[in-house]
Amino acid sequence: MGSYELSKRINWQTYSNARALKVEEIFQQSLQEALNSALPGQFRVDRHPHEFNDIYSTYPLPQNVLDKIYNVDVKATTVDGKPKYKWGISMDFAIRNLKNGKILFGEIKRKDGWVENTNMQQGRGNAHERSCKYFAPGLMRLLRKTGGLSEEILPFWLVMAGDITRDPRRNREIAYWFQEYTKNYFMWRDINNIGDLLDFFENNLLPYLF
């Protein structure tokens, strides 16, 4: 597959210093614009996809477990016919190839970190650790089946932003978790530089969506 040079497809400087936009919005809008320019009509970047909103509430438990817990009728509906109980996971984005059905799901985490002139406690918080649930066998299997991606990579992409991307502790933790799957996480150290994000996506993940 040839290079599409996504970072040159948009005037990404127009997103720089767009303080009114959240990181998730900058990510979705810039990536969608670049893909539209390079591959018109082939990709859609969704925010908060709905595929997995009820995976927990619909998961069957064996009777010997149901007999020992507080149980509810998970098939119950409201007066307008909607499920009364519905819980699962909501990922931050889905990058969809509309022609072949492949999907890359992902999360964007922005948090503080331990950097110059701060102390180690500045990197407290577990937003990055919550992303580890995607390594669980059940979720890994579901994401891989739904996304249809090669087993050469993980079926999800973690994008980190904020000072955590320069934190010496957190960089080591995250690198240790992913190890040989370096294509599956990106430290977006300068969110005003969308070119870095687009180049990383094109060079590491876009090929798996074809």
Image (cartoon, grey):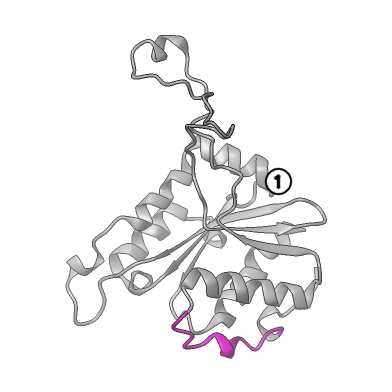
Where, quadrant-wise, is the N terminus in this rendering? bottom right
Label 1 SS: loop
In magenta segment, residue 59: no
Kindly identify the residue that appears in the image at 55 percent across and 85 percent down.
15
Residue designated by label 1: 148
How far from the left and from the top, in percent, is residue 83?
A: 54, 32
* Magenta-colored span: 9-20
How far from the left and from the top, in percent, is residue 21?
A: 48, 77
Kindly identify the residue that appears in the image at 46 percent across and 88 percent down.
17
Where, quadrant-wise, is the C terminus in this rendering? bottom right
Question: Please, what is the dominant secondary structure of the magenta stretch?
Answer: loop
Number of numbered callouts drawn:
1
How far from the left and from the top, in percent, is residue 135?
A: 47, 44
Left of 106 or right of it: where is 175?
left
In magenta segment, residue 11: yes
Which amino acid lies under the numbered mark 1 shown in the image of this protein?
Answer: Gly
Residue 3 visible in the shown view: no
> Image quarter for residue 82?
top right
Kindly identify the residue that appears in the image at 36 percent across and 65 percent down.
171
